[in-house]
Image (cartoon, grey):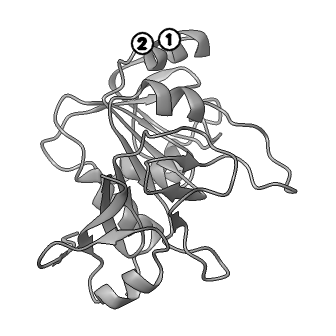
């Protein structure tokens, strides 16, 4: 069975390492804050000016003035700090973010990402994504493997306007975990119950399968 949005976030949370400074993009990436493994201490950074972001609040703890970059209410962790968005982007552009998690419309075998515009549809703009793909040390993409029409979003070459070039290392979809290098998607894990043939049929870009592919452990 394909993973839910929450399960994608849960799998990506396993990529977090103790001491990391992490930026979470809007959409599925923001859910990662709810699944940080026990014993792993990370500082979540939001580009609107918050370092030390916590999980989503319960109803009795909602503060409408405390939001993330996606304008969702959040909580703060012990030691959190508030500052201007200019300082926040200085952190990102200065290479001080260890890992960023982004959503995407398309990713290709060169590690290119298209994440901010579908021509003909109204968009608010690129946001901080261009700075994040240029400044973060490591980038993981959270996305559906195929679009609503059943067409692959993992391509030989992106067709939508690019956010960044040759910058994506790993993709976690509702079907699989894939690493990107040497001009191909390398299949590392598959969602529980999902057959390799299903992943192959929904991956337009070059897909490399080396040996046995294990099921994800969530």
The quarter of the image holding the C terminus is bottom left
Residue nearest the viewer, comparing 36 with 209: 209
Examine the rendered structure and indicate whether residue 150 appears above or below residue 95: below
Residue nearest the viewer, comparing 84 with 148: 148
- The tag on residue 94 is 2
Judge left or right: residue 125 versus residue 10: right
Image point (54%, 20%), residue name = 49
Q: Residues within 10 Å of mark 1 (few under 14, many from 20)?
A: some
Considering the numbered disc 2 on the image, is that residue within a helix, a strand or a loop?
loop
How far apart in space, not on screen, are marks 1 and 2 (Cα)? 6 Å
Image point (64%, 29%), residue name = 65
Judge left or right: residue 39 versus residue 53: left
Q: Residue 156 in the image: state x and y as whole percent.
A: 50, 62
Residue nearest the viewer, comparing 14 with 208: 208
Image point (38%, 76%), residue name = 175
Residue assigned mark 1 = 90
Residue nearest the viewer, comparing 39 with 164: 164
Considering the numbered disc 1 on the image, is that residue within a helix, a strand or a loop?
helix
Observer able to see residue 157? yes
């Amino acid at each position: 069975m394909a993973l839910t949005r929450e399960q994608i976030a849960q799998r990506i949370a396993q990529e977090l390492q103790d001491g990391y400074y992490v930026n979470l993009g809007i959409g599925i990436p923001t859910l990662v804050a709810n699944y940080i493994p026990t014993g792993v201490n990370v500082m979540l950074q939001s580009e609107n000016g918050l370092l030390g972001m916590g999980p989503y609040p319960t109803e009795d703890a909602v503060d409408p003035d405390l939001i993330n970059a996606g304008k969702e209410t959040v909580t703060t962790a012990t030691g959190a700090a508030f500052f201007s968005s200019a300082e926040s982007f200085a952190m990102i552009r200065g290479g001080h973010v260890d890992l960023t998690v982004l959503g995407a419309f398309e990713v290709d075998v060169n590690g290119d990402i298209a994440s901010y515009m579908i021509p003909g549809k109204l968009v608010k703009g690129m946001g901080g994504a261009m700075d994040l793909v240029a400044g973060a040390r490591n980038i993981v993409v959270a996305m559906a493997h195929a679009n609503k029409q059943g067409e692959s979003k993992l391509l030989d070459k992106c067709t939508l306007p690019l956010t960044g070039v040759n910058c994506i290392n790993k993709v976690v979809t509702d079907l699989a975990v894939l690493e990107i290098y040497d001009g191909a998607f390398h299949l590392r894990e598959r969602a529980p119950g999902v057959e390799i043939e299903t992943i192959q049929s929904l991956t337009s870009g070059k897909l490399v399968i080396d040996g046995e592919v294990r099921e994800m452990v969530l």
